[in-house]
Image (spheres, grey):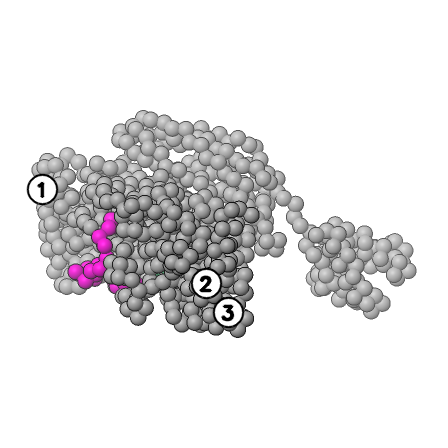
Amino acid sequence: MSNHHDEVQAVIALMTDEEKIDFVSGHGLWRTAAIPRLGIPSIVMTDGTYGVRYSMTQIDSGSDPEAALAAFQAVVNRRADDGGPGMFGDTHPATCFPNGNLLGCSWDVALAEKLGQALAAECRALGVDLLLGPGINIRRTPLAGRAYEYYSEDPVVSGDLAAGLIRGLQGAGVGASLKHFACNNSEIDRTNMSSDVDERALREIYLAGFERVIAKSDPWTVMSAYNPLNGVQSAENHWLLTEVLRGEWGYSGVVISDWHAIKDRPAAVHAGTDLDMPESGPRKARLSAALEAGELDREALDRSCRNVLSLVRRLSGLRVPAAPVDLVRHHALARRMAAESIVLLKNDDAALPLKSLAGKRILVVGDGAIRPTIQGSGSATTNPFRVDVPLDEIRALAAGAIIDFMPFAKDGVGDLEKQTADVVVAARGADAVVLFANHRTGAEGEGTDRSDIRLADGQDALIEAVASTNARSIVALTMPDAVTMPWIEKVDAVLACFYPGQGGGAALAQVLFGRVNPSGKLSTTLPLRIQDIPGFHTYPGENGHHTYSESIFAGYRYYDLRAMEPLFPFGHGLSYTDFAYTDLYVDTDTVAPGVSVKLQFSLCNMGKVFGQEVVQVYVRPIEPGLKRPVRELKAFSKHALAPGEAATVDIELLPRDFQYFDTATGRWTLRAKAFAVEVAASSRDIRLSRILPCESEPIPVPRIATTSSPAAVFSHPKAEAALKSFFVKRLNLDGDEAQGLLDGTRKSFLGFYDTLSWSIGESIPEPELAALFDALDEEEP
Ligand code: BGC
C-alpha cells in the first residue's frame, strides 16, 4: 500500500464519528468541512460548465443553512433572460464562454482544453478549488431544459470535448466534476422521474461518454444525477457508482451528490456516494443515527472519508496565491470559440460572406441584435463581465456598407403584424437582411423543459415575408437546441449560434463578413418536426417512469434506422471553402478481436480561403446478427488548411469501436460479417469508405433446459450425440430407434421435454433430462 494511502488511513483513524459525518457532508453550500484539529482545510467549489459562477454572499460570508437553500433555489429557478440588476447581483463577474450547445459544434478538443485552462485561471483568482462541470448528458431530446449545457447527442463528441476541458482545468490545478451521472435528460419532475433505460442503451450511449472521459482525463470528482436510474436514485445506485464506475472502470476519485439529490443518506454511503452536497442538518442527523444504530457499514464510511481526504489534500496542495485574470484575453477567447463553433447550415449561391460592401444596404432585424441571449438559465449561468452587442459588432466590420436596424420582438409580444409589415418595407430597400431569430422564450432552462421547438411567435411569418423580397435573407438563430424552420427553402443562408456566450456578437459579425470562415458542425440532429424526436412517444414519462423507448437509437441513430430525413443531420456544417477527401488507406484487411484499425487519408482545401474541416469517422456494421445502429461515430478531428493546402489525416479505431455490449454475457463483443469504415463530412455525407470482413468472436453456446425448443437443444454442439446415447441406454433402444425419436421432436416449437413426452410418456422423468442438460451446459460455458 502506498505511503499516501497509509497516511490518509492514519488521519481517518484519528477522526471521531462526528467528524467523519461532517467530513462526508458539505459545509454550507459550496465547501467541504474543515477539521482544524487534524490540519484538514476546507475546499471551495462552485459552478459551472462554461463560466465561473461565484456567489460572493454565499461563498464569502460562510454558511447560513436556512438562507443557503433559498439562495440555491433562487439561482436555479431564475431565467437568464430575466436580466436586470438583480439577476447576477451577488455573483462575481466572469467570462461567459459559449455554452455547451455551441462548444459541442466546435468538435475541437484543443479548444475545449483552452477553455479548461481559462476556467482554471478564473477559479484560481477567486480561490475556487473545484469547478462543478462539465456536464455531458446526452442531448436525447431537444426539449430538455438543460440541453444547452450539454455538448451532443453522441458520446464520442461529448466525451472527447469534456476530456479536453478537464485536462485543461486539472492541468492548471483546479478539479473538475463530471456530471450528471447518469441519464439526467429531462427536467420534468427531475428528482423523482426514473430514467428507465435498457442496459445496451446505457452501456453504448448514456454511460459511454462518462467511461470515455474517465479513461481519457481522470476527473477528480464525478457528480451523480438528480434522477433515479431504473428505479434507484442515482446517488443511491450501487450498481452505477460502485459496480460500474469503480469496479469496471477503475475510477478512484470522489463521487459527489447533486445538490440535495440524496433521499436516503445511509443508502447513498453504501452505494458509493462520498460527499453529500450541500450541507443538510437532517441528512447528517440521519447518518449519525444510522451509525449509532449499527446500520451503517463503517468501512463504507471510512472509504468515503479516505476519498474526500485524498481530494482535499490534492486540491489544497495545488493552491497558489491568487493571480489576477487577464479578462480581456478571455473575452477574445470567448469570441474565438464562438466564431469557430457557429454552424453555417445553409448558404445558397454563396449568400455569405457578405462582400463588396461599399454602398450596400444591410438591414439588421430583431431585438436579438441589440439584446442578445447569450446563455441559458439555471445553476450554470455566468455573470458576464462584458457582452458584445451584435449590431455594434456588425457596424464595426461593415466596411462602407450602410447598416440599418429594425426591431422585432424576441418574446413574441406586441403588434407582430405591424412589426412585420414595417420590416418588409425596409427590406425592399436593402441588399441583404440579417434576421435575428430565436426559440420561443419561456420558462425553459434548468428546472423546466421546453414544450415545443418553434421560434418565438411571429418570427416564422417575419422570415417568410422577408424571404419573399428581393433582398438576400440571412437568418441567425439563437436557441438552446433544435428549432423548426418551416421557411428553410425560402431563405438564402442560415447560421446556428445556439447560446454563444459573451463574445457571440463579434463572432457572428466575423462570420457574416468572412473574417472567420465558419467551421462548426452540428453535434445533434435538427428534426423537421417535434414528432420526429427519438423517444417522443414515451417522453416525458408517466407515473414516475420515463422509458427510453428508442433504446440505443439515440439521436442520428434513430433517424438513420427509420430512414427519416432530418431538417439537418448530425455532423452537418458548411464552410466558405470546399474540402476534398481522397486516398483512403486502411492498415488491415480484416477486423479481428483485439486489433486496432489505422486509417489514413488526404484532406485538401480546394477553395480560395483558409478554412477548418471537421472530419468524422463512422463504423457501419454489416450483418451484425442483432439490431445495431446503421452507423456510429467513432472518431473525429479538426484540421486547419490554407487554400490549396492538403493534410494527411491519421485516425486509429480501437477494438471497442467495433463492438456492441452483449447483455447475455455482460461483455463488449465483436460480431458481424463485416464492417464499413466510413470517412465523412457529416453523418449523411460519406466521402470515403472501405469494407473490412470481420473475424467474429465465437458465439457462446446458449444454455439449454428441458423447456428449450428442440431447435435450441440441437444447436448445442454436443446435445444430439449425448441424447442419442442416453436414449439407447435409458430406453433400451438401438441407435436407429434413438435417432428416430430425436428426429421426431425436431420440428416442434414447444419445449423439448413436452415434445418428447408425446412419444415416450413419462418413461424418463423430467429431472433426469434436466440433469443431462445441466451437465452439457457446464461443459460449454
Ligand atoms: C445542478 C448542478 C449544480 C448544482 C450546484 C444543481 O441544481 O443540477 O449541475 O452543479 O446545482 O449549483
| Furthest residue in direction front, as rendered | 37
Is ligand 1 within 8 Å of the beta carbon of the residue shown at mark 1?
no
Q: Which residue is mark 3?
A: 291
The percent position of residue 418, horizontal first and vertical second, equals: 12, 60
Disc ID at residue 402: 1
Magenta span includes 578:
no
Q: Which element type, helix, strand or loop, lies under badge 3?
A: helix
For image coordinates 33% across by 59% down, the residue present is 30
**Residue type at tag 2:** Lys
Find residue 455 and report its image quarter.
bottom left
Percent position (x, y) of residue 359? 8, 37
Q: Nearer the viewer, mark 1 or mark 2?
A: 2
Categorize mark 3 by other alpha carbons within 10 Å: few (<14), some (14-19), many (20+).
some
**First along the sequence among labels 1 and 3:** 3
In this picture, residue 467 sits left or right of residue 633:
left
Image mark for residue 20: 2
Amino acid marked by disc 3: Leu
- Marks 3 and 2, the one that precedes in the sequence: 2
Query: In the image, which residues are magenta?
Result: 75-98
Element under disc 2: helix
